[in-house]
Image (cartoon, helix red, strand yellow):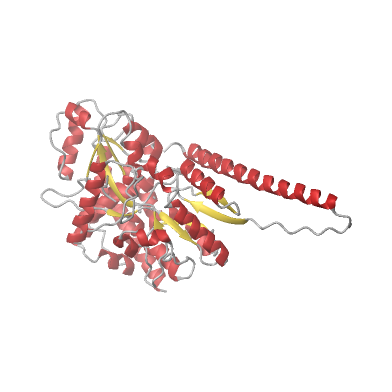
Amino acid sequence: MHGRSTPSSSVAGPTDEVGAPAACAADSAYSAYSACSRRTWLRASAAATASLLLGCERAGKEESSTVELAPAQDTLVLNALVWAPDWAEEMQRVCDGFMHEHPGVRINLQFMIGNSVEENLKPRATTDSLPDIVSVNASPYTASLADQGLLADLGQTRSWHGLLDILQREWTAPGGCRFGLPSGVATTLIYYHPDLFERAGIQALPGDFEQFLAAGAALRRAGITPLALSGGFPNMLGNGPFSYGFANLVASSTPDWRQHIANGTLALDNAQGWAVFSRLRTLMTRHLVQADCLRAGYDATLRQFAEGRAAMTFQGSWAAGVLMQGRGQPVGVFVPPWNDKDQPRQAVIGSETGFAIAQRISARHRQAAARFLDYLFGAGLPVWQGKRQNILPFKTPAPSAKGDAALFALAAGMARDAAATGAPGLYYSYLPVNTIDVLHALLPAVLSGKTTPVQAARALQESISAQARVGGK
C-alpha cells in the first residue's frame, strides 16, 4: 500500500503508496537530492584530492622519472529511484549514514514523482533499464517483473527473514522469486478528532455508510468541516474510498475476485460497481469535504486535519506520525464504514510500498544494494520510522519503533479478522497496471461530477477486460 506520490499533481489498518502543489513537492525532492549529491560529490572530491596529493608527495621522493602510482579503488555507485514523498529528507539521511559506513559506495538517489509507483516503473521496465534499487508494490505487475528475471531474489537478506509470514507470501512471485521488502503493513483509516465529534454531539462512531453520512451532517451543522480528502491526488482516492468501496460492495460478494480480474471477467457494470463510485461522489454532493477538495493534494490535506480544520481525514497508516501529532489534542482512528447497513465492515489491509533490486546488474552491485536495504531496515530504521510512525512489517518489532498503541492494536485486529474470515483486502494497486492509469483519471472525474458512477464502473470493467485480453496474447 502505498505511500503517496507527488501529483503532477498503532496498527489501524494496512501497499505507497502521499499535498503541496506538485511543484513544491518536486522542488523539495530535487533540493534533497541535490543536497545529497553535493555531499557525496564533496566526499569523492576530497578523497580524490587526498589521493592526488599523496601521489605528488611520493613522486617527489622518487629519483626515477617514471613513477607508477597504485590505482585508487573504484567507487561503486548505486542508482536508487524511490517513492518517499513523505520522508524524502529522512531517506537522504539514511543514504548519508550508509555511505559514511561504506565509503567505497555512493548512493545516487532520485525520487519518483507522479501518481503511482507503477507510473515510474513501466518505462524503465519496458526498456530493461531499472535502477539498482527501486521502489515497488506487492502487485501482480511487480511479480511479473520478477518472473521475467528483472528483479533479484532478496531471500538471503537479513530483513527478509524478519518479515511477517503473510508479507513474505505477498512479496513472493509465482515463480518463487522473493522480489521485495515492504516498508510496513498498510491500511487506510478514518482519523478523527474526538473533541470535534463531541462538539457536534456525536456520541458513537459510525458503523456503516449511512451512519457516516449522518455524522458528517452533524459536523456540518456545528460549523465543522467533516472530512479532509485529497481530491487532487488520485493515489489516495484509490487507496482510500475506492479500495474500501470495492472491498465492501464487490469483493465481499465475489470471493474469487482476484481470478476474475486476472481473466477479465470481473463484473462492475452493475449496482455494486456503480455504488463504489457513487459513494465517492456522495461525499461531494453532501458537502462533507473541504471547499478546495478537488485541488487538495496529499500534504495540504494532512496539514488541514493536523491543524484541526477538519474533523476527519481518510488517510494511510503510513501518515500516522503527522496526523496524530498535530495540535496536542487526542486523535482517534476507526475502520472506514463503507459497508451497507447490517453488513460487516471489510478490512483493506496489505503492504506498503517497498524496495527491490534489479537482477540484470553486476553481482557486486546486487551485493552492495542488499547491504543498503539491510541498513535501511536496520541501523537506518529509527531515522525514517520515527517520523512516519507506521506499522512495521516485522515479526519482532524493533525496540526503537515509535507509534500510537491504539492505532497498532486496531490494525492488528483488522489483520486477525481478515486472516480468520478470508475477508477481502484489496488495495487498488492489485489492478492491472494500465488499468490503474485509467482509474486515476476516473476518480477525480467522478468526484467533480464530470463522469457519472455508471460511466466510471463501465470504463473500469472494460479496462480490466482489455488488459486480460492483451495479457492472454
Quadrant into which the C terminus falls: bottom left
Is 193 located above or below residue 170 in the figure? above
> Residue 122, relative to residue 279: is it above or below?
below
Q: Nearer the viewer, residue 386 or 220?
A: 386
x and y percentages locating residue 128 in the rendered image = 54, 65
Q: Position of residue 308 (x, y in %)?
A: 30, 29
- Toward the left, the furthest residue is 342
Residue 431 in view: no
Residue 470 versus residue 308 in the image, above or below: below
State the residue in front, 407 or 396. 396
Residue plotted at (66% across, 58% down)? 74
Residue 94 at x, y = what percent?
49, 46
- x and y percentages locating residue 348 in the rendered image: 26, 53
Q: Nearer the viewer, residue 25 or 439?
A: 25
Q: Would residue 450 be found to the left or right of residue 8 on screen?
A: left
Q: Is residue 20 above or below residue 221?
A: below
State left or right for residue 175 relative to residue 60. left
Residue 292 shown left or right of residue 103 in the figure: left
What residue lies at 20% left-to-right and 62% top-to-bottom? Answer: 422
Q: Quadrant of residue 155?
A: bottom left
At 38% from the left and 41% from the top, the residue drawn is 386
Within the image, what quadrant is residue 68 found in? bottom right
Residue 461 visible from this viewpoint: yes
Number of marks drawn = 0
